[in-house]
C-alpha cells in the first residue's frame, strides 16, 4: 500500500511514521514536510512542500496512491486574528486542494486530522453526531474543512479524526506542555471550580496506533467521523497533583468560581472499527511527558 502523509515532521507525524514503516508493514510511505529533517527515518520518501504556496500539490509525485493521512495544519493556529490568512490557507484551502489532487491519483481513503475543539467547550461528553459549536478560529477552520471534504466521499472514503488532547514527550505547544512550563516556572495555574478543564487526553503512541489501525480497516463508511481520545477522564487538578508528586514542589493554584469546562469525546465508534491494544495510562504517559519537558527546559 502506498501512503502519503502530510505534516509528517509534526508531533503526531513524527510518531506515526515509524509505525507505518516498521519492518513487515509492507507500506511505501511518502512524507510531506516543509524541510527535510537531518535525522531521516528509514524507509520514508521525503517530499519538500509548503502547503501555503500556490499550486503546492505540483510538488507531489504524479503516481497512484492508496491512502492519504492529512495531519498538516497551520503552525499559527493560535494566532487569531493576526494570522487568520495562514490558518485558512493551510487548514481549509490546502485540505481541499489535496482532496482534489487525490481524485486524480487513485486515492481510496483520505484520513483528515481534525480536532475535538469543533464541539466547543460544553458540559457534556461528545458523540460524533453531536452539534458542533467551535469557539476558536482553529476549531472553526477544522470544521469548515470537514464539511468541504464530505462531497469528496462520493469518490473515496473520507475519515475525519477528531483528536482529543494528544500529548507526549517532544510536544512543546499544547495545553499540557503549557501547564508543565507554568508549574516549573512557579507561575499560577488557574482552576475553575477547583478542577479546571476536564478532558480525555490520548498518549501520542496510542493516537499513532489508532491512525495506523484505520489505514488497515477494510470496510468503512464513505464518510466517517471518529473521536480519538483516551479512556480516562482527567482534570487540571489531577494534573497539578501529579506534577507535585513527581517534583516535590508545590503548585501555585488560583481558584475561580467559574464552572469547569469539559472537552471529552467518546471513543465507541473507533473501538468498533479497530481492535486496539490497551492504551497508555495517563499516569504513565504524563510522567514520561513531564520528565522530557524538564530535560528540554534545562537545555534551553
Image: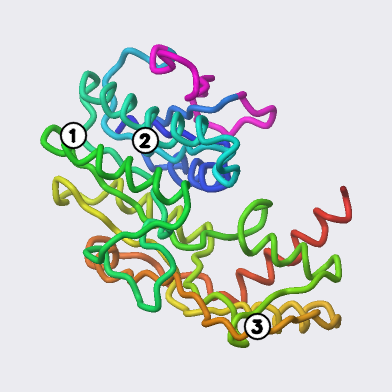
Name the element at disc 3: strand
Whether residue 141 appears in this view of the structure is yes
* In the depicted structure, whether residue 120 falls above or below residue 45: below
Q: Mark 1 or mark 3: which is in front?
A: 3
Q: Quadrant of residue 68?
A: top left
Q: Is residue 155 left or right of residue 193?
A: left
Report the Cα–Cα distance between label 1 and label 3. 46 Å
* Disc number for residue 152: 1
Q: Is residue 166 left or right of residue 68?
A: right
Tell me residue 85's x, y (percent): 50, 30
* In the depicted structure, whether residue 195 falls above or below residue 28: below
Residue extending farthest left: 154
Tell me residue 29's x, y (percent): 42, 31
* Disc number for residue 271: none
Report the Cα–Cα distance between label 1 and label 2. 24 Å
Predominant secondary structure, magenta span: loop
Whether residue 8 appears in this view of the structure is no
How many neighbours does mark 2 have within 10 angstroms: few (below 14), some (14-19), or many (20 or more)? some
What residue lies at 44% left-to-right and 14% top-to-bottom?
54
Magenta region, residue range:
35-58
Amino acid at each position: 500500500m502506498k501512503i502519503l502523509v502530510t505534516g509528517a515532521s509534526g508531533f503526531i507525524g513524527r510518531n506515526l511514521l515509524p509505525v507505518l514503516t516498521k519492518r513487515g508493514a509492507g507500506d511505501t510511505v511518502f512524507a510531506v514536510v516543509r524541510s527535510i529533517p537531518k535525522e531521516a527515518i528509514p524507509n520514508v520518501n521525503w517530499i519538500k512542500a509548503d502547503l501555503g504556496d500556490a499550486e503546492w500539490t505540483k510538488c507531489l509525485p504524479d503516481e497512484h496512491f492508496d491512502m492519504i493521512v492529512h495531519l498538516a495544519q497551520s503552525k499559527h493556529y493560535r494566532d487569531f486574528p493576526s494570522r487568520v490568512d495562514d490558518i485558512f490557507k493551510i487548514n481549509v484551502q490546502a485540505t481541499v486542494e489535496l482532496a482534489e489532487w487525490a481524485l486524480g491519483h487513485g486515492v481510496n481513503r483520505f484520513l483528515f486530522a481534525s480536532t475535538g475543539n469543533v464541539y466547543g467547550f460544553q458540559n457534556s461528553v461528545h458523540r460524533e453526531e453531536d452539534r458542533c459549536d467551535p469557539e476558536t478560529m482553529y476549531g472553526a477552520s477544522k470544521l469548515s474543512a470537514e464539511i468541504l471534504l464530505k462531497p469528496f466521499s462520493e469518490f473515496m472514503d473520507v475519515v475525519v479524526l477528531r483528536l482529543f488532547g494528544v500529548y507526549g514527550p517532544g510536544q512543546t505547544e499544547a495545553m499540557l506542555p503549557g501547564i508543565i512550563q507554568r508549574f516549573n516556572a512557579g507561575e499560577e495555574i488557574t482552576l475553575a471550580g477547583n478542577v479546571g478543564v476536564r478532558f480525555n487526553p490520548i498518549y501520542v503512541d496510542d493516537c499513532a496506533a489508532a491512525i495506523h489501525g484505520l489505514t488497515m480497516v477494510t470496510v468503512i463508511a464513505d464518510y466517517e467521523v471518529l473521536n480519538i481520545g483516551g479512556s480516562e477522564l482527567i482534570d487540571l487538578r489531577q494534573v497539578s497533583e501529579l506534577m507535585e508528586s513527581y517534583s516535590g514542589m508545590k503548585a501555585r493554584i488560583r481558584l475561580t468560581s467559574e464552572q469547569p469546562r469539559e472537552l471529552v469525546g467518546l471513543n465507541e465508534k473507533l473501538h468498533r472499527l479497530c481492535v486496539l491494544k490497551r492504551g497508555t495510562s495517563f499516569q504513565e504517559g504524563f510522567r514520561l511527558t513531564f520528565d522530557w519537558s524538564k530535560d528540554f527546559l534545562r537545555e534551553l
